[in-house]
Image: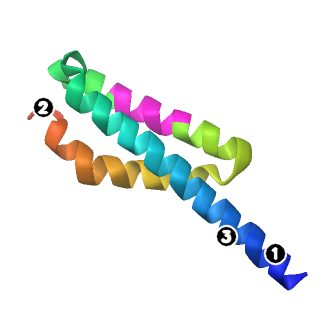
Amino acid sequence: MLWTLFYKLLQYMFGSLVIGFVFGFLGCLMLKHIRHITKQAKWETFFMLTVGFISYLVGDLWTSGVVSIIATASMFAIYGWYNLSPQGR
């Protein structure tokens, strides 16, 4: 009983982290290689909010959406910063 609860907790946490890191990684790659997103700061902001919201929705289907959006935001904070325009920073 206790082991199954612990297993479910680990499954939800690591599943959420994987979903968040995947969406964060894909979002950072898109910021880097699709340059017309980074022409204006409002499009960068819209893109980052949209990727975060999609990560939340996908994470909420199977695991914790809140943990997945935190993982996505941390990926954007660490790796997406260098691909933003000066106005977006």
Which amino acid type is shown beneath numbered disc 2? Ser
Look at the picture and state if 6 lies above or below 35: below
Give the Cα distance between marks 3 and 1: 9 Å
Which amino acid type is shown beneath numbered disc 3? Leu
Q: Where in the figure is residue 16, as x and y percent of width and height?
A: 59, 55
State yes or no: residue 53 in magenta: yes
Give the Cα distance between marks 2 and 3: 38 Å
Q: Please name the residue that numbered disc 3 is placed on.
A: 10
Choose the circle earlier in sequence order: 2 or 3: 3
Which amino acid type is shown beneath numbered disc 1? Leu
Residue at 36% across / 27% down in the picture? Answer: 47
Q: Where in the figure is residue 2, as x and y percent of width and height?
A: 85, 84
Residues in magenta, as a range: 46-54
Checking the image for residue 48, the label placed there is none
Residue at 47% across / 55% down in the picture? Answer: 70
Q: Where in the figure is residue 53, as x and y percent of width and height?
A: 52, 36
Q: Please name the residue that numbered disc 1 is placed on.
A: 5
The reply to whether residue 35 is in sight is: yes
Pick out the residue farthest to the left.
86
- Residue 52 shown left or right of residue 34 in the figure: right
State yes or no: residue 64 in magenta: no
Q: Please name the residue that numbered disc 2 is placed on.
A: 85
Pick out the residue farthest to the right.
1
Residue at 35% across / 51% down in the picture? Answer: 75
The kind of secondary structure element at disc 2 is loop
Quadrant in which the C terminus appears: top left
